[in-house]
Every structure is written in C-alpha cells, then in structure tokens.
Image (spheres, helix red, strand yellow):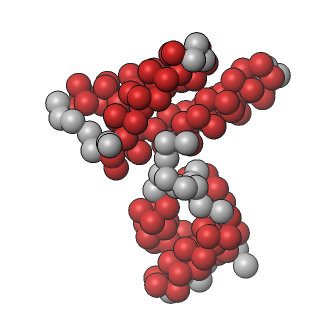
Amino acid sequence: MSLKEVLQEDWKQALKAKDKFKTDTISMARAAILLVEKTDGEQLDDEQIFDVLAKEVKQRREAILEFEKGNRQDLIDKANAEIEILLGYLPQQLSEEEISGIVRQAVDEVGANSIGDMGKVMAIVVPRTKGRTDGRLVSQIVKQYLNK
C-alpha cells in the first residue's frame, strides 16, 4: 500500500471516529501533496511524499517559533499535535547520536577541519538524513563538531 493510500485510509478512519483534529491534519497533508502533483503534473511516489510531509513538519516548527514570540500557547500545542500526526507518516526520526555519527563520517570523508568546510559536510549529511530529521538540528550538530 502506498503512502498516499495509507493517508486516505487513515483519513477515512479518523472521519468515522469523528476525530476532527486528525481528519483536518491529514486533509491538510493530502492537500499539500495534491498541490505538488498538480503543479508538477505527475503522481508522487512515497519518497516525494516524504519530502512534502517533511516540508509540512518544517513549516509547523517554524510557526511554533513565531507563536512562542507571540505567547500563543494554544497555537503551539496545536502545531505540536499536528507535527506528531505527520511524523507518524515519515520514516523513523534519527536521534542526535545517530546524526552525530553521520556527521563524524562525513567530516572524515571530506577531511573537514574548520567551520569553513561546513558546506562540504552538509552536502554529504543532508541527503543521508533527508526526511528523518530537522535540518536545523543537523546544522547545529555540524557547527558544534567543526568548532571543536
């Protein structure tokens, strides 16, 4: 069963269970996928759907930062709950230790020894962690590792 079909089935189940929040969250995700498909004129495979869902998670994480500035705990809670639902459709998220291991390996591969080599390291790390972690966390770990 494709990820798109899984989303459809989960949406139907949430609808039957009268879980309005989950139904709305899955509907937003499906709408984002449909928008990309219509824009590109092609059906998305699971990898491309992961990218769309990861982008949705990223948007919500960025929104949380703004909600914190505005002291809107209700919107922060809502965004966090949406993120939890969306993460259920993404591949298993990497731990900080796993990311550090990937960063260490990338640093060894390119022979990086200063913060000036961050771009080279990120070029290797990002494809290996795509859809399985937050890019800001990866960037932060790379910076910490190169500043040692």
101 is higher (above) or lower (below) than 31: below
Residue 70 relative to residue 43: left or right: right
Q: Quadrant of residue 73?
A: top right
Residue 17 relative to residue 35: left or right: right
Count of numbered circles on the image: 0
Across and down, in percent, residue 89 comes to 49, 42
Q: Quadrant of residue 94?
A: bottom right
Closer-to-camera residue (85/94): 85
Across and down, in percent, residue 98 comes to 62, 70
Closer-to-camera residue (120/116): 120
Closer-to-camera residue (113/28): 28
Name of the residue lying farthest toward the left: 41
Residue depicted at x 41% and y 62%: 127
Q: Quadrant of residue 68?
A: top right
- Is residue 119 in sight in this rendering? no
Across and down, in percent, residue 20 comes to 59, 14
Residue depicted at x 58% and y 51%: 134
Residue 3 relative to residue 16: left or right: left
